[in-house]
Amino acid sequence: MKVKEILAASDRTLISFELLPPLKGGDIGKVYNAIEPLMEFSPSFINLTYHRDEEVIRQRPDGTLERITVTKRPGTVALAAAIMKRYDVEVVPHLVCGGLDRHTIENILIDLNFLDIDNVMALRGDPAPGERFFTPTRGGHAYCSDLVRQISDMNRGVYLDELQQNPIPTHFCIGVAGYPEKHYESPNLSQDIRNLKRKVDAGADYIVTQLFFDNARFFDFVERCRAEGITVPIIPGLKPVSSLKHLEMLPRTFHIDMPEALTEELSRCRTDEQAKEVGIEWSVGQAKELKAAGVPAIHFYTMSRSGNICEILKRVF
Ligand code: FAD
């Protein structure tokens, strides 16, 4: 079932989770171990992140250097299909522009279609490691809106391969990312929201936000999106702080502010356990307020660990 239909059919705040495929060669059992306790809370859909190939320089045994391509977390498509089959839950595999040309993207979407996966989360992806700016792959897309357009074209039966005589339309429901505190490359929030509108105009059905710790930023963002003419559902994304190092790491990695009250509480913590409890309490407060405001769903970034997320859900839902 499509996420947009699930959202439209519900009159309460739903729950969704984001998980990562295991590191290459890692145990799929770890992902299942993370999902199992979460299933108790009947998530409406589960997202699986997509990780682009990376080019690295490696030293050969004879001392010479070679450039190779490594994929740290492959398997998004297969894992999405495996989770859907195992838990009978809707899945939303992510798909990025970075490192992929249009034909490869088309083939991935054909795989998803054959697997009866109805949803896809379209993203541009970050710059490749070691690069300052995002560089589109040759024959690939520069912006997420171009990827959304490609998926929308396939939904209308328009494929890249012109040899195809009567292409069958796909039926993907398309999610895209939004940034309540603006995307870090954007000069300001207004410009970023105008670019978000491009994604919606290209065919995006709903928006999931970057994580944030200040609900006021989210409410303001929604208001500004509506004023810009964006009418699709906007789902807030939450990630609880779960260790002392998150105090610096989360703002730096995700280009977001941490409110002073949260920073002060975390500064008083001496152990990761204490920081985790502060993180749970803060997310509980955020989730309660978001739920009371009637958001369509709350999307939890789990990082494939479920203990703290389950604790939050028990206290809120
Ligand atoms: P875009 O929408 O293309 O925007 C990128 C920048 O370009 C923004 O500053 C925007 O304002 C600007 N822009 C957009 N269109 C135009 C235009 N036409 N002209 C000029 N400027 C424009 N990354 C992964 O690698 N894998 C994942 O699985 C993944 N999942 C994510 C899930 C969520 C919910 C979120 C919020 C992020 C996720 N990311 C993931 C990170 C994401 O790839 C990065 O944030 C990336 O830098 C931007 O992706 P985007 O799709 O928002 O890009």
Image: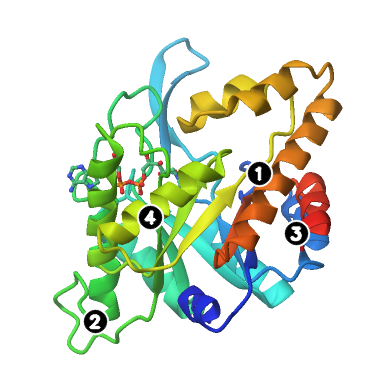
* Picture layout, residue 275 above or below residue 170: above
Give percent across and percent down for residue 87: 73, 73
- Per the model, the C-alpha gap separating discs 1 and 3 is 11 Å
- Amino acid type, mark 2: Arg
Is ligand 1 less than 8 Å from the beta carbon at label 2?
Answer: no
Image height of 160 relative to 62, above or below: below
Q: Residue furthest left?
A: 162
Q: Of callouts 4 and 1, which one flags the residue occurring earlier in the amino acid sequence?
A: 4
Label 1 amino acid?
Answer: Met
| CA separation in Å, label 1 and label 2 | 35 Å
- Residue 263 visible, this angle: yes
Name the residue carrying label 2: 156
Q: Residues within 10 Å of mark 2 (few under 14, many from 20)?
A: some
Which comes before the other along the chain, label 1 or label 2? 2
Residue 118 point in image, percent of width and height: 47, 77
For the point 58% across and 29% down, the residue is 259
Q: Dot 3: few (<14), some (14–19), or many (≥20) neighbours within 10 Å?
A: many
Q: At 63% across and 41% down in the image, what residue appears? A: 23
Q: Quadrant of the C terminus?
A: bottom right
Q: Residue 144, how many percent across, how many down?
A: 29, 52
The residue that appears at 19% across and 72% down in the rendered structure is 161
Label 4 vs label 1, nearer the camera:
4
Q: Earlier in the sequence, mark 2 or mark 4?
A: 2
Which SS class for mark 4?
helix
Pointer 3 residue: 35
Q: Residue at x 54, y 39 (%)?
A: 72
- Asked if disc 4 is less than 8 Å from ligand 1, the answer is no
